[in-house]
Image (cartoon, rainbow, N blue to C red):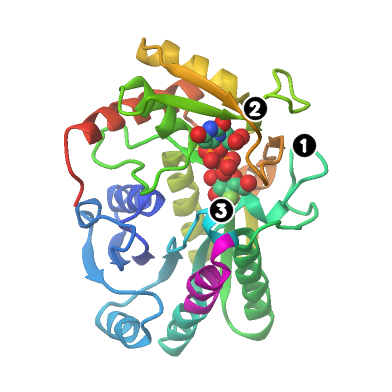
Amino acid sequence: MAILVAGGAGYIGSHVCKLLHKRGFSVVVYDSLIHGYRSFAKWGEFVQGDIGDAECLSLVFTRFKIDVVMHFCAFIEVGESVAEPEKYYKNNVQNTITLLEQMRKHGVNKFIFSSTAAVYGMPERMPIAEEDRKAPINPYGKSKLMVEQILEDYAQAYDFRSIRFRYFNAAGADPDAEIGEAHVPETHLIPLILDAALGRRESIKVFGTDYDTKDGTCVRDYIHVNDLADAHIRGAEYLLDGGQTSYFNLGSGSDFTVREMLETVRRVTGRDFKVVEIERRPGDPPYLIASSDKAQKILDWKPGFSLEDIVRTAWVWQKCLADKTLT
Ligand code: UFG
């Protein structure tokens, strides 16, 4: 079976490609390299192109017989999405429609979409279940929810089946340290703390210590990127076996505060670093914890990596990253 991985040279996409390859799937990576790295696309064929480029996509669907498309190409910075909404709606929504159009034109009707916990906005209860209220509070989350709605309509109107995976806090790295998280700019907590532990950053800032949580800092559900990758393979198998359009939260169900993350990094790395407590970051919900019961029930998916594994693999990767320039 051949899988087209749009965004396969990025953080989550590349981990999925590695696992797909290991499990015997043929992989075609399609990536503009705007945020991805050519060196991350080492499993399968590689085509450089933008998902908004209908002609290039058409050539890919003509050249390769694709069974399932996985779509990881998106702009993901919440703050930027507020400042430049057009960029987000164009890339995350309009270009996704171009990809879907080309799929239908070439008779490809199975699709896996990277969605996000951001579709829930400020959730009313924990853990969050898939049917809970969707009320995104920024253009990033709205752009993802719009595509989710488009996919529901496609399922009604066309012979087109899809899965939407709502990731919670994706983290960690390939245990072989071949690939890992390398966003520019980096905004995510774990790589930033590790950078501070490496001395590449003067300090780590804690955004808000007055939340109504056990230690005043925000609580998140961190899930290892390889557990996400495993869910995608199960998702592809589900669609290939005739499964209907569906959607799943992907989280570990664990709840760690920012302060607990700092402590875990100290323990795993054996290093200390400067911590600066500042005001809240706008738009941060105090809690984001997933119920992933649905994925467990329908896809037989269960996370296998602990928080220690997440921090350990990210630490090894971050140390490698310090010694090289990614291309
Ligand atoms: N944080 C800090 N200091 C930092 C960076 C982050 O204290 O330097 C805190 C944040 O305030 C938050 C937690 O660490 O409480 C995690 O922050 P991240 O930026 O790593 O991740 P988010 O929880 O903000 O982001 C996740 C997903 C996004 C999604 C968002 C929805 O990564 O894709 O949840 O709110 F949009």
Residue 62 in the image, given as x and y percentages of width and height: 29, 85
Q: Residues within 10 Å of mark 1 (few under 14, many from 20)?
A: few
* Of residues 18 and 2, the one drawn nearer to the viewer in this rendering: 18
Describe residue 32's horizontal placement relative to residue 97 as left or right.
left
Q: Residues within 10 Å of mark 3 (few under 14, many from 20)?
A: some
Residue 91 in the image, given as x and y percentages of width and height: 48, 72
Q: Residue at x 71, y 57 (%)?
A: 136
Quickly name the residue at label 2: 255
Question: Circle 2 — which element?
Answer: loop
Task: Give the distance between the C-alpha atoms of the residues marked 1 and 2, in whole angstroms.
Answer: 10 Å
Query: Are the two marked residues, 1 and 2, in contact with CB atoms closer than 8 angstroms?
Result: yes
Going by the numbered disc 3, the residue's amino acid type is Gly
Q: Which residues are magenta?
A: 83-95
Q: Residue at x 66, y 35 (%)?
A: 280
Going by the numbered disc 2, the residue's amino acid type is Asp
Q: Where 144 sits versus 154, above or below?
A: above
Describe residue 234's horizontal placement relative to residue 288 as left or right.
left
Q: Which mark is residue 126?
A: 1
